[in-house]
């Protein structure tokens, strides 16, 4: 009886429209929360880098809290995204999966998920141990910059694809993702320049500190 009720609801076009609207709303809220947290974290990291601030225990706790919130938002995006895809599949059939915009979004969210695992397991522990981005070994620092750039660009790019309904079926997958690696590279190079500048300032300041302490 319950199965028959569910099947009849799924065949009701008006019910599916309201269901899709509710799921899209939750999906949008999760995306906004994640983007806000990521941008806040990135701005704080750049500010601390320029000020050459060493992370405190409070900063580490705050960073872990941000990371957990982003993970929860990412899980919510996966769940609501799969729900939206399922609803649209019921209406449009298998052909819906051939939509290049949908494929692009899945690729970017999959990369975000893998990138989040790297951040949580490798980058964050190394950053907490070193106390500062500048104190990381070269390879660890490059990984941190790459993961940070990919995270910031991917969230914004996924949001753009999400609201870009006119992009559906109009462009191929390669065309939709053409600017994606370019933006990641630009973000990485920008952070690399800022890091090198802060590193050079540390080298210049160190002798002055040594002289001052000797006096």
Image (cartoon, rainbow, N blue to C red):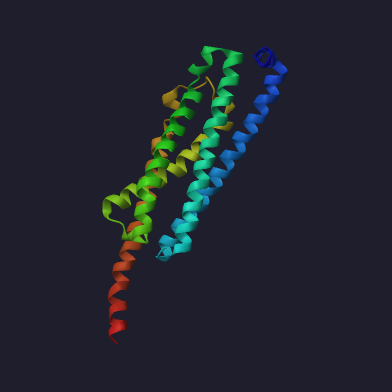
**Residue displayed at 67% across by 30% down:** 22
**Residue displayed at 37% across by 56% down:** 127
Which of the image's four quarters has the N terminus? Answer: top right
Number of disc labels: 0
Which is more toward the observer, 105 or 119? 119
User: What x and y, as percent, mark residue 156?
Assistant: 51, 40
Residue 112 sits in which quadrant?
top left
Residue 11 sits in which quadrant?
top right
Quick check: 36 left or right of 137?
A: right
User: What x and y, as percent, mark residue 150?
Assistant: 41, 42
Which is more toward the observer, 90 or 213? 90
Which of the image's four quarters has the C terminus? Answer: bottom left
**Residue displayed at 50% across by 18% down:** 97
User: What x and y, as percent, mark residue 44?
Assistant: 48, 57
**Residue displayed at 47% across by 60% down:** 59
User: What x and y, as percent, mark residue 209?
Assistant: 32, 77
Quick check: 177 left or right of 85?
A: left
Quick check: 52 left or right of 96?
A: left
Q: Is residue 193 visible in the rendered structure shown here?
A: no
Name of the residue lying farthest toward the bottom: 215
Residue 17 sits in which quadrant?
top right
């Amino acid at each position: 009886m319950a199965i028959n009720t569910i099947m009849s609801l799924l065949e009701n076009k008006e019910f599916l429209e309201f269901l899709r609207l509710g799921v899209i709303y939750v999906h949008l809220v999760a995306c906004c929360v994640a983007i806000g947290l990521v941008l806040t974290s990135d701005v704080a990291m750049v500010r601390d880098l320029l000020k050459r601030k060493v992370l405190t225990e409070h900063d580490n706790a705050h960073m872990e809290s941000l990371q957990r919130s982003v993970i929860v938002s990412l899980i919510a995006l996966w769940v609501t995204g799969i729900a939206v895809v399922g609803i649209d599949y019921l209406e449009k059939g298998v052909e819906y999966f051939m939509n290049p915009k949908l494929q692009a979004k899945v690729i970017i969210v999959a990369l975000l998920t893998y990138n989040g695992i790297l951040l949580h397991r490798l980058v964050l522990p190394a950053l907490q141990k070193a106390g500062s981005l500048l104190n990381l070994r070269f390879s660890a620092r490059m990984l941190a910059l790459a993961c940070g750039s990919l995270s910031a660009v991917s969230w914004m790019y996924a949001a753009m694809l999400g609201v870009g309904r006119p992009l559906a079926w109009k462009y191929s997958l390669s065309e939709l993702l053409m600017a994606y690696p370019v933006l990641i590279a630009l973000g990485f190079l920008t952070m690399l320049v800022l890091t090198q500048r802060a590193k050079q300032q540390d080298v210049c300041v160190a002798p002055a500190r040594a002289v001052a302490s000797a006096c």
